[in-house]
Image (cartoon, rainbow, N blue to C red):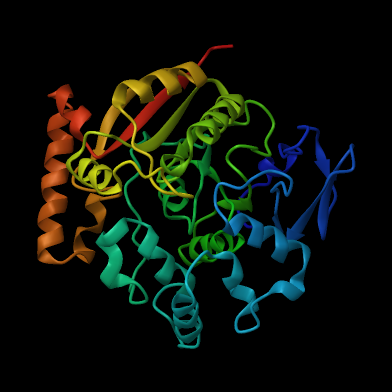
């Protein structure tokens, strides 16, 4: 699976009954006989009997169990598990044929879902990996779980900051892209396919749990299930840093008005009031504070300014200034579009 250590393999458990997993090669198995495929060294620890938060999880399971389900145009890129449209798959195949491509071809197209419309003009044209600055102190070797890692940008950012990182995602293709991107950048992170609501790790396995642009898409019950799992795998006094969409940001209000009374669809963004977030995270994990991530959108990162056009760069700079100001004027946190919930797990 790549990486400087394999401590995470010893802490893997069955996501159904949390018993230890053993095996090698093509599958892992627990004492109860639950079996999980391993694809090119990557365990696929999804449950086929539960409803999925995103349709591509079923595609990942299907491909893991049946190699014949692969898209024959580029079987090593796992196109059928990426949750993208046909035109984008064709673009990946074409980009993969270039020698050399500037960045991993899958990442070059998955970047379109990284920060909404901010990256729209970069899809298929990336010349470098957009790795942000993660808002955490120096890792000093502490163990971090990146929930919903996609192509690995935050896993890479955390590893660069000194954390020993495991990234999980329900997309087999995204996890494989994350592994390739990490290797290309000389990063030692580990990746596997799993569900945030059924984490395949023993209790207290991590010092830090991070998640960005993932739980904001979950329905309430699914989010609460994921938060309970975060609490379970955190060590006593461990910290979680989880990004969520706030209901009162300018962009959030605009999208809420557009949606009207229509209920959110599968993996649509859900917008939460700050008080609701503090209550839910506090009850599930522990003492929780909110801080501003960005304004005027979701996913705006200062490190990406060089990739943006003038108008978007101006918006990005304004967002950065407001986020900085919110540290002195806490009321501004309530009108951020994107917030971080920082929770500290109980001592016992």
Q: Is residue 291 left or right of residue 323?
A: right
The image position of residue 115, as x and y in percent, is 32, 56
Q: Residue at x 73, y 49 (%)?
A: 48
Which quadrant of the rendered structure holds the C terminus?
top right
The image position of residue 230, as x and y in percent, is 55, 30
Q: Quadrant of residue 70?
A: bottom right
Q: Is residue 151 left or right of residue 311?
A: right
**Pick the front one: 258 or 83:** 258
Q: Is residue 118 left or right of residue 46?
A: left
Q: Is residue 214 above or below residue 109?
A: above
Q: Is residue 193 above or below residue 252?
A: below
Which quadrant of the rendered structure holds the N terminus?
bottom right
Q: Quadrant of residue 16?
A: top right
The image position of residue 286, as x and y in percent, is 47, 17
Q: Residue furthest front?
A: 261
Q: How many marks?
A: 0
Res 1 visible = no
Q: Is residue 66 left or right of residue 146?
A: right
Q: Residue at x 13, y 38 (%)?
A: 322
Q: Quadrant of residue 76?
A: bottom right
Q: Residue furthest top?
A: 348
């Amino acid at each position: 699976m790549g990486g400087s250590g394999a401590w995470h393999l010893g802490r893997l458990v069955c996501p159904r009954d949390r018993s230890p997993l053993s095996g090698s090669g093509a599958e892992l198995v627990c004492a109860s006989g639950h079996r999980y495929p391993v694809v090119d060294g990557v365990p696929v620890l999804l449950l086929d009997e539960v409803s999925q938060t995103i349709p591509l999880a079923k595609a990942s399971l299907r491909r893991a169990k049946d190699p014949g389900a692969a898209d024959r145009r580029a079987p090593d890129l796992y196109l059928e598990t990426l949750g993208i449209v046909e035109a984008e798959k064709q673009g990946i195949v074409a980009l993969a044929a270039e020698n050399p491509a500037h960045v991993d071809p899958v990442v070059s197209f998955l970047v379109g879902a990284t920060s909404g419309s901010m990256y729209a003009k970069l899809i298929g044209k990336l010349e470098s990996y957009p790795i942000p600055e993660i808002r955490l102190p120096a890792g000093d070797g502490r163990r971090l779980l990146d929930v919903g890692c996609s192509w690995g940008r935050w896993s890479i950012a955390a590893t660069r900051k000194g954390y020993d990182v495991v990234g999980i995602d329900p997309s087999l293709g995204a996890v494989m892209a994350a592994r390739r991107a990490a290797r290309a950048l000389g990063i030692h992170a580990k990746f596997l396919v799993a569900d945030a609501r059924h984490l395949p790790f023993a209790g207290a396995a991590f010092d830090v749990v991070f998640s960005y642009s993932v739980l904001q898409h979950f329905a309430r019950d699914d989010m609460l299930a994921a938060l309970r799992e975060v609490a379970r795998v955190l060590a006593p006094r461990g910290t979680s840093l989880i990004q969520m969409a706030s209901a009162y940001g300018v962009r959030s209000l605009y999208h809420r008005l557009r949606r009207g009374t229509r209920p959110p669809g599968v993996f649509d963004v859900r917008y939460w009031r700050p008080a609701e977030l503090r209550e839910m995270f506090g009850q599930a994990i522990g003492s929780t504070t909110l801080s501003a991530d960005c304004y005027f959108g979701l996913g705006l990162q200062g490190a990406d300014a060089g990739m943006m056009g003038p108008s978007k760069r101006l918006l990005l700079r304004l967002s950065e200034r407001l986020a900085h100001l919110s540290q002195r004027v806490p009321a501004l946190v309530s009108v951020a579009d994107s917030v971080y919930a920082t929770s500290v797990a109980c001592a016992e």
